[in-house]
Image (cartoon, grey):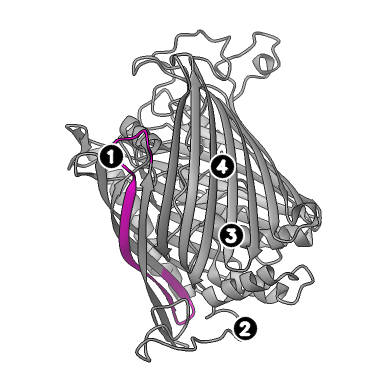
Amino acid sequence: MQNSYAQSRLLKLFLAAAAVLTPFLANAQGSYIPYNRDYYHLLDRYDILRGQNNPVYRSATKPYRRDDVAAYLDSIADDPVIRSRSDQFNIAYLSQDNWEFVSRETPESKKPFLKGLYRRPGDFAHYYSEEFDIHVSPVIYLNGGLEPDFEQNPNRLSRGVVLRGSIDKKVGFYTYFTTSEAFFPSWVKTYAEHNGAVPGEGFWKEYNGEGYSYFSALGHVSYNITKHIEVEVGHDRNFIGEGYRSFLLSDFSNPYMFVKFNTRVWKFQLTNIWTQMTADVDYDRGRPTDGRYPQKWFSFHRLGFNIGKNLNLGFFESVMTDKVDFNYFNPIVFYRWVEQSLGTPDKVMLGIDGKWNFHPGMQLYGQFALDEFVFSEFFGQDGKGSKRNKYGIQAGYKYINAFNLSNLDLQLEFNSARPYTFQEKKDYQSYSNWRTPLTHPRGANFREILGILRYQPIPKLSLTFQGLYQLYGADPDEATNWGGDVLKNRLEGSPTGLFGNEIGQGIENKFVQTNLNASYMLKHNFFIDASHTFRQRTAQDLDSPETSNYLQLAFRWNFIRPDYNY
């Protein structure tokens, strides 16, 4: 215990030193824009329409910096791809949202409130000067839903504040906090009960019997060490990749403490992330309780580079360990070599991702994440279905202005992860944080096909249809492990031997979900959402298909639209 405590203190000292010392070397810097799939799609679609890699930032590493987004918007404001009324509205909306960095004129509010409030459409209140700027806005989410076959109708109320700004245009900062009370749809509640965690939220309390109450707090400080090296110290999530899902690192789990370095030189970008995560949680009567939760440490790096004008490839490596080890703080060392030199005590993954804008308006993308690999068993020479061949694979396609219809965007994606991928044989080394997966919500032992159709018929109205199909294997009880639950030990409870492991083993489930959502922007970042979700699950342990329908209406102000596609 003393050794673990000392290691934790060393890590905190490292994080504090990074936060205190490096701003003195910083250049101009903006804060990061929280990752929001709807928002980021507006940015990424113009790269694809132009058929080129983004000239300012690398889209595989999210979130993006506001000053980078502003520079990109300035560069494409007069581009021929911005031709429809909806595109012109989107560019104006994104520019207004990052107005302090945009070089073009962005209009102030025509009718500010009490003269000093809402002088800018995107800021409740702001102050701007060369030395210091700050932007403050309220955060509100109110929704009510109807799920006929569920006793408790889903609803949620979240309220809080978001604040961002910069000091001397050298140090950017961002903080966000909300408090929420929620009754979730039936499948979200089932997921939370199984994992003991609300996805993306972490610590929670019981609310009126069937509900959840929780407090969310995010924040970061960002700055440039040199012209080409930027640093972010924060408590938030990261997303790596071009897809709807990610097998490298996704935004599904609870936020965590991290230090991130982005080094951009010529055609290369090296991203390093060092984090401290929550390995497990103490419970009392089925609820999280007070206590010093066990911690674990995750290190990640990805080297991405552009090939020509329209192809980007990235090679990544990560390590999860149950104790702090300064060997993994080296930003360019090969983690697998270090791990072997230490006696292979930790979980290392590596792989590749990429995108190819092969034609204006069309993009192919994909990922391959390797957990373990034995050549002869992979190709079936020594045995098929080896438990030691564990990997996740993704392949996707995006079609912008599909079928020559303006602002109709299509995305198709395939995801698959073999049994026991992301699990580990030692405690606190699985690919998880706060009892939720760090990659795909399903964990492993599944195949998935999803399609997304986005349409913006008029500037303020966005329609989104999403269809999802999954084949996955489930465990009949807590003691059995067919390889899908990343929280289980991969050496315990497995009914199979080394060979004969196939995707879908265990209790086979086939699952279909559709979601139709309409969002209308009444005012800047104030939306009305109406949606309908249909779900159907057939399984070997069900006598008949299990179906549910969920209809909801929501109002949100500076709030990211919740996504329950799992």
CA neighbours of label 2 inside 10 A, class few (<14), some (14 to 19), many (20+)? few
Q: Closer to the N terminus: mark 2 or mark 4?
A: 2
Residue 417 visible at all: yes
* Contact (Cβ within 8 Å) of mark 1 with mark 4: no
CA neighbours of label 1 inside 10 A, class few (<14), some (14 to 19), many (20+)? some
Give yes or no for residue 149 being in the magenta stretch: yes
Q: Residue furthest front?
A: 148
CA neighbours of label 4 inside 10 A, class few (<14), some (14 to 19), many (20+)? many
Residue 435 position within the rendered picture, expressed as x and y whole percent measured from the top left: 35, 36
Dot in front, 4 or 3? 3
- Point out the stretch of residues depicted in magenta: 147-173
Q: Nearer the viewer, residue 542 or 493?
A: 542
Residue with the mark numbered 4: 246
Residue with the mark numbered 1: 4
Q: Residue furthest bottom?
A: 115
Give the answer, above or below, for where 501 lies relative to 452: above
Kind of element beneath mark 3: strand
In the picture, which quadrant includes the N terminus? top left
Residue with the mark numbered 2: 103
What amino acid type is highlighted by mark number 3? Ser
* Contact (Cβ within 8 Å) of mark 2 with mark 1: no
Give the answer, above or below, for where 532 lies relative to 235: above
Q: Closer to the N terminus: mark 2 or mark 3?
A: 2
Kind of element beneath mark 2: loop
Q: Closer to the N terminus: mark 1 or mark 4?
A: 1
